[in-house]
Image (tube, grey):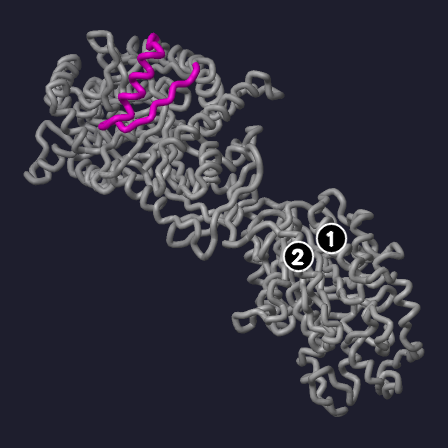
Amino acid sequence: VVVVSLFLPVLITRDASGGLDVAWDYENLLSLEAPLRVTRVGVARVPGDATEDEKAALAARLRRAPWCSIAIFLEEETFRLFYHSFCKGILWPVFHDSLESAPRGRVTTKDEQAWHAYKRVNQIFRDYVVEAYNEGDLVWIHGFQLALLPAFVSRRLTVAKVGIFLHTPFPSSEIFRTLSMRSELLRGILSADQIGFHLYEYARHFMTNCRRLLGTKYEFDARGAVLDVDGRDVVISCVHAGVEPTVLSRVSASPEGARAFENLRASLPATSPRGTAVTRVIAGIDKIERLRGLPLKLLAYERFLEGAAARRAAGDFAEDEGAGGDRTCLVQYALTSFERQADCDKIRRDCRVLVERIKAKHGNDVLYWHEFFEVPIHDRLALLAVADVFWVSSVRDGLNRWPLEYVAMHGAFAQSHAARRGRCAGRRVGALLLSDNASATRVLLGAVAVNPWGVEDCAAALRNVLAMRPRERLARHAKDAEFLLRSTTAKWAYRVLQDLKAIAKDENRMHATHAGLGLGFRILGMRSGFDALAVDRVARAYRGACQNECAGGSRLIVLDYGGTLVPDAAADRSPKPARDVVVVLDALCRDPRNVVFVVSGRERVDLLDGLCGRDENANLGLAAEHGFFAELVREEDWDLAVPAHARHADDWRAPTLALMDMFAQRTQGTYVETHESCLVWQYRDADPDYGEMQAAELEAQLRVVLTPFASQVSVLRGENPSRGGYVEARPAGMDKGALLQRVLRALDAAGRPADFALVVGDDASDEPMFDALHRWLAPAGQAPARFKGRAFSVCMGKKPSGAESYVDTHDNLVELLQALARVSNRGARYYSSHDFSEQYAPPPAPARPPPVAEGEPDSPPTPAENAPGAAFGRSLSMPAFAAVNAPPRPRRAPKSKVPSWVSFQDAFKLPGVAAPGEAPIPEDSNDENQEEDDAAMFF
């Protein structure tokens, strides 16, 4: 395991000879002894006068056992900008849900320098982590100070399992979004495979930030909370750290520990061996920081003393014997810090004023205020052993292990007392009074929790804790001791590392790949074999298809519109393709062997306006609203891609629209889109969490309301980059995949099976096309022999997809289409489309019959409709799926052309005419059975 933290868990001091001495820092959570091969990476805190030679010698020494550590030495200015300016000056308040009272209106040069230093230090750490890494190692990063490190490490170590554990709270989205670099920080953390928090409360804030700021979704399974980040799973582990009771007992029982205990007891007024019976000791250990709540604690203690004095004057001690103000003293250890000096100085001044006021009113013996830069562990454990109550009043707190140490120091006495089953004569097991904002409150269930902002509530809670009976104290302590035994530091580390080790990046044939540069770098979960599309490979397959013209094969090209042929443009709801796109589509359509389709989720008018306003692309097939409408020839009627029984069944729309309108009115940021084929409730602009809840409720209610139409209507709930979150009601079986299946079946039925297929899309709505192509290729597990290597499913951009390959940009796609067009031009043997159309003109088409009036029987088919060529659809020059018509050689006679107004569906249903390879269709065949036939194409 490579354990990475900002500081190495070692203490480096000058010894008597002036050299550098190294010892484990038992205060550090990561100094635990583990039965694993552990390499630690971090900054070595050396004395300021250490020379470069001493640093080099120290680094070499630390690399050897038992330290096995790689020391990092940062330049003083870089460390100042990184740690004091950015980590403590910017990130620390935000991560603790604290904002400046008068924030600046702009990002200053100093802030920019601090941000650059933060990035630089994370890059320096990356280099040392890469050096320490061995194949198969787990990389475990600690602290928000290294939030970008997972991204930097994952770029270099592509197969490494990387975890990061955040020991601080995570802010709410309203606070975190005030950071200008919020997305970079989130993406850096999300580059890890596992993210750890001490409490689910902190993890929930993190997941909410990812949901609101990045659109990342999450779910819960056997592993816990799992984030879906670009197609890969990021596991959230919520395990609260503990302490090592055996280590604490050993330190407390040492000669230094015993001496510290005796000195402290002697300094307190009239105390018994544990400070009870005469004077009740209330202990507090806090840093002098705004969020530690020291002024609030002193105010509450002052109110407690005033109440005790009033009760003493009234002689009312029947209820709370032993809780009188003359029998208590507060021993407060206040730790100064070299971090956030201005904040420390202000809180120190406020606290000193309150301390002087309390002593002036109630005497010097009620309060002992001690300031330390760093309290030695022996002195701290001595205070915890003496105290009857340990009091934490922080208003926002991360990991605080001092309450856990307090429980550990009272564990031996509690066990001996429980064994005796007797009364506690003069000695009591300790009790905890914790702020409900402290992380320890969630795991120490025997503690008394109180709102630190309520001064009166804190004073009353302190009085109740001091008056607590021994039996209740023991019962509460037993709950806390159970957690200590179950969650030691070693067990905490083991559980987190087990979660990290269990992650498999290549599970279900998925593997991690990378995209983006700089801080836009992302790790994507991809299928194995998902690679960039090779243009030359596609061109060779395109050229090799349809070589045998007598076989009647075709080349199918299906292209998505928005995001594929037209780049995404959020501001323009109806973008039009560029001129080069129009030209290359026209060139592809002029090849009689090609069948070119453009599919879109847009309405018909948008598609026509974008592609059909010019003379080009007259033979381009169009499919609107995810294939609900299809048009084969310009100025012809659109065909419906739904069964006949559902084409006019709109009874479901009225109740659906009413229900969606009701949800739109009560959910801010939502609206209803009314399309010809479907109804869509959009909630992409709503609050993400509330929108998800309302969407789930709307989906459930729609399924109930539409029960009578279950066979006709599908209710879908989803989310994609272009549409955001939505709930959609649409005819059953309507999507782009169903359209592609109908096209392929129609080609087979028309005697023009596809020998080449290119399907390109960009978002989730195109995934059914890829699936349909793969199913058609290998219905029994193997692709047809004639089709091997000639089917290509392509997505736009490197991202998780069911496609087999990708193209990076829109320009790459245009270059691919242009390459195919050049192949078609060379294959035409210099015959122009005009030459072919004149030389091989089909026979004149019969006049289009007048429409049949409603209620009248259908007119009998005309002789032209019964011609053999009618069964094969349109000519090759059209994107319809006809049999081989006009081959590019003069000696071959062209086949007859079906009139453009005769759709494929009608052509296949002509009485007595069968598609190639099928038995003749009797004139009295059942309509329903014929609609279900593969040849009953909607064209």
Q: Is residue 666 visible?
A: no
Residue 632, x across and y down, in percent: 80, 67
Q: Nearer the viewer, residue 934 or 357?
A: 934
User: Is residue 268 inside the magenta stretch?
Assistant: no
Magenta residues span 49-75
N-term mark: 2 or 1: 2
How far apart marks 2 and 1 lie (CA) works out to: 9 Å
Q: Amino acid at mark 2?
A: Val
Residue 140, x across and y down, in percent: 36, 36
Identify whether 90 is placed above or below 157. Answer: above
Q: Which residue is mark 1?
A: 819
Q: Quadrant of residue 744?
A: bottom right
Query: Mark 1 and mark 2 in contact (Cβ < 8 Å)?
Result: yes
Q: Tell me what residue is drawn at x 38 percent, y 43 percent.
A: 237
Q: Quadrant of residue 801?
A: bottom right
Q: Label 1: state its secondary structure.
A: helix
Q: Is residue 320 visible?
A: yes
The numbered dot on residue 578 is none
Q: Label 2: state its secondary structure.
A: helix
Q: Amino acid at mark 1?
A: Ala
Q: Which residue is mark 2?
A: 538
Q: Nearer the viewer, residue 359 or 397?
A: 397
Q: Quadrant of the C terminus?
A: bottom right
User: Is residue 68 inside the magenta stretch?
Assistant: yes
648 to the left or right of 521: right
Residue 819, x across and y down, in percent: 73, 53
Q: Tell me what residue is drawn at x 75 percent, y 70 percent.
A: 640
